[in-house]
Image: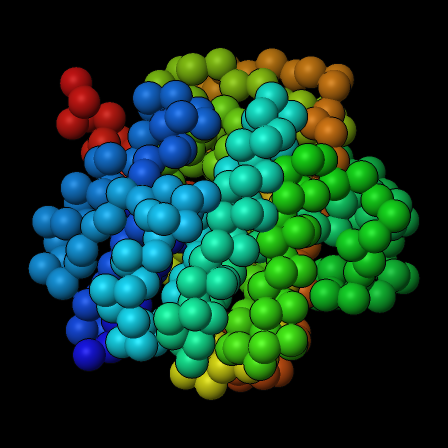
Amino acid sequence: MRIALITGSAGLIGSESVAFFADKFDLVVGIDNNMRQYFFGADASTEWNQNRLQEAHTNYIHRPADIREVNQLDPIFREFGTDIKLIVHTAAQPSHDWAAREPFTDFTVNANGTLNMLEMTRQHCPEAVFIFTSTNKVYGDNPNYLPLIETETRWEIDESHPYFQDGIDEFMSIDHTKHSLFGASKVAADILVQEYGRYFGMKTGVFRGGCLTGPNHSGAQLHGFLSYLMKCAITGTQYTVFGYQGKQVRDNIHSYDLVNMFWHFYQNPRVGEVYNAGGGRHANCSMLEAIALCEQISGNKMNYTYSETNRIGDHIWYISNLNKFKNHYPDWTWNYDLNQTMVQIHDSMVARLEQTV
């Protein structure tokens, strides 16, 4: 039997992974205890997504285990053992601001939880491919010291800089920089995944995401900005833009495109590898540009305010360079551009809001 084990299985990337791998494996085992509701409140609950997955995929099994607790993970790994061929570890505390409220919780979820998953893999299914969703926040605020130029709607890097054409590559330093506590806990996890690959020879892959997005995101004010932004556009809820004149730039990758990267890696895995994973020059926008796109798609004028206080560790300009991954896996490319993704988010959000009325 071939089993895929997915943590954070009711979240954005976890649920996309379940749907993607359900017809490629005999069984998909999901681990998710809906901590997103604890982090961000009832509106961010992933219970709706868990129910959707259980209804849609007959070979999906859900386990509400806490990745911080080895005594909850060990029975799952013992039950399925070496039949586990793929592990996609997406469970995390994902917010800068929230991490500062509860540093112990943030670190134990992101760092200790990842260590637990790695060690369970090493003990029970060491030949499995282990994929970890890291973040571009491991680079801290180093991107903010690039030569940036302010334009009418965005910050942009100087055309003479090597990063202008394709974005930031994996050789940017993750040292001597301010990460936020969230960024620090993800750095710890990122390095652990690399080390288990390089020290133990395990097939581990680290994917440093830009903004991960898609129609199944339970967006909240502190995390999932495109999803939450579109929700505010639809409902008229006030949105706050934090700092940089609203011109800060992010690249955005559809959840399907990211999971498709995982699939390519699984088919030809490498040891302790690291990849930047985002929308690159293919799909990126500033906050002001995202607001304009939400208004265009929803047909509503957005209600937003501006705060001069930027979030600690936030990037002014970040675009991922995916050349390394594309060189290793030349058959992969994006399926969704930014407009297609935003239309999907809008239509999914409208449908979900109608169901709650």
Instruction: Kindly identify the residue that appears in the image at 58 percent across and 81 percent down.
Output: 201
Looking at this view, is 234 or 186 the one in front? Answer: 186
Q: In the displayed structure, would residue 213 be above or below residue 323?
A: above
Camera sees residue 311:
yes
Instruction: Kindly identify the residue that appears in the image at 47 percent across and 85 percent down.
Output: 268
Looking at this view, is 186 or 115 the one in front? Answer: 115
Camera sees residue 331:
no
Q: Position of residue 267 (x, y in %)?
A: 41, 83
Question: For this view, does 292 lie left or right of residue 47?
Answer: right
Instruction: Describe the colour scheme in one phrase.
Output: rainbow
Q: Position of residue 8 (x, y in %)?
A: 37, 48
Q: In the displayed structure, would residue 31 be above or below residue 311?
A: below
Q: Quadrant of the N terminus?
A: bottom left
How many marks do you count on the picture?
0
Instruction: Kindly identify the residue that appears in the image at 49 percent across and 62 percent down.
Output: 118
Q: Position of residue 82 (x, y in %)?
A: 31, 77
Q: Position of residue 115 (x, y in %)?
A: 54, 55
- Image-quadrant location for residue 65: top left
Question: For this view, does 172 lie left or right of residue 334?
Answer: right
Instruction: Kindly identify the residue that appears in the image at 39 percent across and 21 percent down.
Output: 41
Looking at this view, is 259 or 97 the one in front? Answer: 97
- Image-quadrant location for residue 97: top right
Q: Quadrant of the C terminus?
A: top left
Q: In the displayed structure, would residue 202 be above or below residue 219?
A: below
Question: For this view, does 170 lie left or right of residue 210?
Answer: right
